[in-house]
Image (cartoon, grey):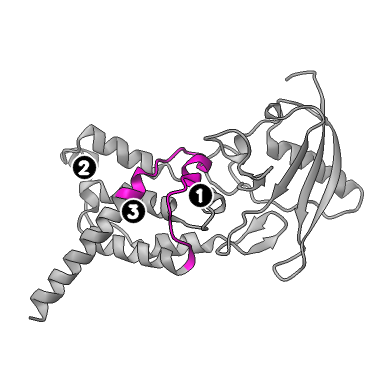
Amino acid sequence: MSDKQMRITLTAWRQDGPDAPGRFETYDVPGVSPDMSFLEMLDVVNERLQREGKEPIAFDHDCREGICGSCGMMINGQAHGPERGTATCQLHMRKFRDGDHVTIEPWRAAAFPVIRDLIVDRTALDRIIESGGYISAPTGGAPDANLIPIPKPVADAAMDAAACIGCGACVAACPNGAAQLFTAAKVQHLNLLPQGQAERWDRTINMVETMEEYFGSCTLHRECEAACPKSISIDFIALMNRDYAKAQLAQRRLVGQTFP
């Protein structure tokens, strides 16, 4: 650990509940180690607030390893902070300078209502995943599953899409509050693989149309790609749009065969 200590000024959004008016509160934070993670710095602030008999700053967190996606917040107007490809829990205070003024806010998106302080309700993302259902291909044991030939580029692309942790940074960063990058990642990590083909068209239509109920439309600002802590490419949005067009065509053909 470094012996160097920093002092920052922290301005945090405080909101007592979904229907309560929000406000910014400012705190002086001395004794910050550059080796602290951003959430460890918030822990220090909260411990001091509790000692003073005040309410701590509420924020989501779980794994603190950049896996769960629950730690998302806006830091100086940037989703997850100034370091690209990094979740808030992986951001270290050495990315800031002694004397810096740091402002933290919850995700600002109509689909993410504030629950308290920095915590927002992201169940709209869960509804998209739920609408996609499951894959029905019985793969058997590991040897049986390995009998299905999958080209390495396809497997790599599916794994890249599956890296999405559902944090909502793409939505918060998008000027339109769109969730295309999240939805595309969740659609394509199954659509690219042979095990996901049986429900491919239904899955695509259901997930895209559920997304459109809650979120804005994508106009390719690419802010989502820049904010994503897993650096997921907007190429997946193009793949999803292609599959959605094909799914609609397949659905019309099926209707035409059933009802001539």
Q: Residues within 10 Å of mark 2 (few under 14, many from 20)?
A: few
Classified by dominant secondary structure, the portion drawn in magenta counts as: loop
Earlier sequence position, callout 2 versus callout 1? 2
The CA distance from mark 2 to mark 1 is 33 Å
Residues under numbered marks 1 and 3 in contact, where contact means CB atoms less than 8 Å apart: no
What percent of the width, then of the height, locates residue 186? 38, 52
**Mark 3 = which residue?**
187
What percent of the width, then of the height, locates residue 221? 47, 48
Earlier sequence position, callout 2 versus callout 3? 2
Circle 1 SS class: helix
Tell me if residue 256 comes above or below residue 231 in the rendering.
below
What percent of the width, then of the height, locates residue 148? 16, 41
Which region shows up in magenta?
214-238
Residues under numbered marks 2 and 3 in contact, where contact means CB atoms less than 8 Å apart: no
The residue at 60%/34% (across/down) is 90
- Label 3 is placed on what type of residue? Val
**Mark 2 = which residue?**
145
**Mark 1 = which residue?**
170
The CA distance from mark 1 to mark 3 is 16 Å
